[in-house]
Image: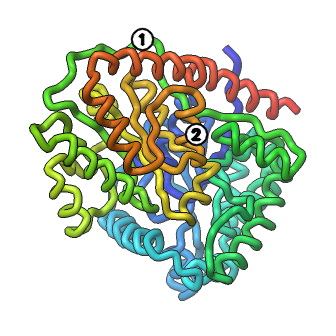
Amino acid sequence: MKKQPKVLVISRDSWNDTNNSGNTLSNLFQNWDAENIANIYCRDEIPNNKICSNYFKISESLLLKKLLRKTPVAGIKVHRQETVLATSEVKDEQNEKKIYDFFRKNRFHIFLWGRELLWKMVNWKSKELKDFIKDFNPDVIYSPSYDSFYMHDILKFVQKESGVKVVYFHCDDLVTYRQYSWSPLYWVNRFVLRKHMDKSIRLAAKNYCIIDEQSRVYKKIYNLDFDILYKTGDFTNFPPTHSPNVPLKLIYTGNIIYGRIHSLFSIADALKTINSNGIKATLYLYTANEITPEVRHRLESSGSVEIMGKVPYSQIPGILNDGDILVHVESFEKQQMLATSLSFSTKIVDYLEAGKPIFAMGWKEAASIKYLYDNGIGVTANNNQEVLDKLKNLIDHTESLNDKGLKAWNFGKEKHNKKDVLKNFEDNLEALKKE
């Protein structure tokens, strides 16, 4: 058996399977042995995964403490097989979550630049960080791309210290100017980000994109190769089927931010009409996002939505399998439409793996919607009338649900099969190690 390359992962969030970024990391490195993987991350969060046990944390709370001379360093090594939560760690994580939830809802550029200034002012390039890199002695660096300038500085520093090749993974469009904003500050920020992205992309020995359209656009801009790295699923056996629920269960798992909630409102309204002469279908909404009283009332007043809140990721496969139709939505807000035009929702792979029909609403040029439509693996709707007509047709013809689910699963087996995707990924990392 060949020896795995030692991979140093750089991430902004902690490696936590309960969030999208952590789940994606675990999906890619699920075959890695613990001694061959380490992680540098930049949030006061607790790692939570079964793969990595060797961490170095640089956080903004530590940067502030160093600035105020309350601590000598801005980064600490975290090495644990089993996470033991100290009271101070839990408090730091809760406080930071509140701050980032606020910034996520209110992306004021003055705050974002204040954060960048903190990273510039405080020296995070400590002896401890250098020792961590030297002691682990990586063969390859892996990093997703980020819109935080300091993450690009960290990538360059770690690459210089280690002298090894970089694998760079692009999930969102952080490059093009095909965006929408009336704020001059937004465009200043975008221009500076583009400069950072240019350097990081050319620093990388291997660039991956999450979807074909993003790869095509980036190739044209940079005249470089951008391979596709799909999220994977287990498509060994088709999941057990069951008779349609009465009423049908529509399942949504994911964020309701970035304008997606308005598409969910449209589906709730369509269900209200469909259910006017008796409940035929109910939408079950699973999300970790805060649901305001106004949003809750708007959804529940339809009489067709059950708000289930947050559940552990480990429960999601069972929830999807118990459903009849899986729902995906994208925003129709112009800023979000353009921002997501090259992004792919990784939960679609979970949906394909579940072997259920997919119903999606969103702008037809959004990458996830286009992916479902172009490959014939989902029923897509681009406006309210289409939502009503197509959803009603699905609900009224339950005899076709299993066939649609099987078609989606077969596509997933061809494109997102973990055996094939991960072998190719692991072979590429091994090749970079030998170069």
From the image, state whether disc 2 or disc 1 is nearer to you: 2
**Element type at mark 2:** helix
Q: Amino acid at mark 2?
A: Lys
Horizontal relation, residue 314 to residue 163: left or right: left
In front of the other: 218 or 276? 276
Task: Give how far across and how far down residue 234 sits, in percent.
Answer: 47, 21
Q: Amino acid at mark 1?
A: Asn
Task: Give how far across and how far down residue 222 sits, in percent.
Answer: 86, 51
Task: Give how far across and how far down residue 248 sits, in percent.
Answer: 20, 31
Q: Residue at x 56, y 77 (%)?
A: 63
- Colour mapping used in the image: rainbow
Which image quarter: residue 212?
A: top right
- Residue that sits furthest to the left in the current view: 278
Residue 417 visible, this angle:
yes
In the depicted structure, whether residue 39 falls above or below residue 402: below
Q: Check the picture and name the quadrant holding the N terminus.
A: top right
Q: Earlier in the sequence, mark 2 or mark 1?
A: 1
Task: Give how far across and how far down residue 73 sits, in percent.
Answer: 59, 73
Distance from label 2 to label 1 (Cα)? 27 Å
Q: Residue at x 71, y 32 (%)?
A: 5
Q: Mark 2 highlights which residue? A: 370
In front of the other: 435 or 214? 214
Which image quarter: residue 251?
A: top left
Horizontal relation, residue 87 to residue 403: left or right: left
Q: Check the picture and name the quadrant holding the C terminus.
A: top right
Q: Mark 1 highlights which residue? A: 237
Binning the other alpha carbons within 10 Å of mark 2 as few (below 14), some (14 to 19) or many (20 upward) gives some
Q: Residue at x 64, y 64 (%)?
A: 147
Q: Residue at x 53, y 50 (%)?
A: 363
